[in-house]
Structure formats: structure tokens, C-alpha cells
Image (cartoon, rainbow, N blue to C red):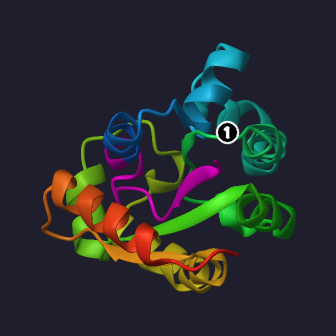
Amino acid sequence: MQNLILVGPMGAGKTTIGRLLAKELRLPFRDSDKEIETRTGANIPWIFDREGEAGFRDREAAMLAELCAYDGLVLATGGGAVMRDENRKALYAGGRVVYLHASVEQQVGRTARDRNRPLLRTADPAATLRALLAVRDPLYREIADIVVETDERPPRMVVFDILERLRELPPR
């Protein structure tokens, strides 16, 4: 057994789809951002405000290294988890990586009312999401075993697509 790791931009559905995958596979589910919040007793925006993005990314790297060392869980990562080379290496080594791709329009719709997204505290969240995707998309693809489109698709359909495609993968 190995881990199933979900990467992708905010609003792609990593947490929702991750929970459903974990249930289907009868595996534990972990969300790296939620794990950080639980252990620090603070939410992500508070950590960003107090420690800056670099401080948060340090916490994230430590959490990802720990979670990727487990065997047999479904892991949803934060959208920026791929920004550090050490994280990409840990994620790829930690199991099968699924990139949940979502258009910027879909991301805007899914994150519009979420106040827990410090990087979207801008006058133009869509422009921010476009800029983030331009940088991060190649990094997601670099480590992905599977790329799955999530736009306009019910989460259960995405889950069954992932499970079918995982069965078709050759061993690494």
C-alpha cells in the first residue's frame, strides 16, 4: 500500500475528493493545511499574518515530510505545496500523485466566499489565481502520475475516474 496524494490549485476540490477517495478505499484521510491548523492551534490566515508566507511554507514542508512518510493514507495538500523542490520530492516519493486541475473560473467560483485564503486577499482574486496557476501548473504536472479535470464534474465522477486510472498505471 502506498499513499494517494492530491495536488492542485485552491478550489480544485482536493479536500472534498480526498475524503470521498479515502472512504472508497477505506483509508485514513489527512489534509496538510488542517493538520497544520490543528497542531498550531491557529488558522492559516493567522499564521500568514504572524509568520508571513515563508513561515507558513516552513511549517508546510515539515508537515508534508511527516505525512508522506506514512503508508496507506489519502492526503490533500495545500495549493502551494509544490513550490518547494523538497516538497515535490517528498510528494512524489510518498505515493501516487493526482493533479486535480481546475480552470481559474472554477477556482474563483469555489473560493469566492472563503475567508481562509490569505493569497486571495486582493482586489482581483481572478488575476491572482491566473498568476498562481501559470507558475504552479508545470510543477503539479512534473510530479503527477495522473492529471484529472474537475471543472463542472460531480466529485463522485472525479473519484471514479481517479480510481479507474490508478488501476491502469504501471508500477513505479
Bin the neighbour count of mark 1 within 10 Å (Cα to Cα): few under 14, some 14-19, many 20 and up: some
Front-lying residue, 21 or 52 = 21
13 drawn magenta:
yes
Q: Residue 76's x, y, as percent?
A: 52, 47
| Residue range corresponding to the magenta coloring | 1-17
Instruction: Left or right? Give the position of 124 relative to 151.
Output: right
Q: Please give the name of the residue rendered at 87% of the width and 63% of the height, measured from the top-left corner.
A: 86
Q: Residue 157's x, y, as percent?
A: 17, 60
Instruction: Left or right? Give the position of 21 relative to 88.
Output: left
Instruction: Left or right? Give the position of 38 relative to 150.
Output: right
Front-lying residue, 133 or 145 = 145
- Quarter-of-image position of residue 115: top left
Q: Secondary structure at mark 1?
A: helix
Q: Please give the name of the residue rendered at 55% of the width and 29% of the height, measured from the top-left corner.
A: 34
**Which residue in the protein does label 1 denote?**
48
- The reply to whether residue 45 is in sight is no
Q: Please give the name of the residue rendered at 56% of the width and 44% of the height, measured from the top-left corner.
A: 75
Front-lying residue, 61 or 30 = 30
Q: Is residue 67 above or below residue 88?
A: above
Q: Residue 106's x, y, as percent?
A: 23, 67
Q: Is residue 133 above or below residue 75?
A: below
- The reply to whether residue 103 is in sight is yes
54 drawn magenta:
no
Instruction: Left or right? Give the position of 164 relative to 79.
Output: left
Name the amino acid, label 1: Phe
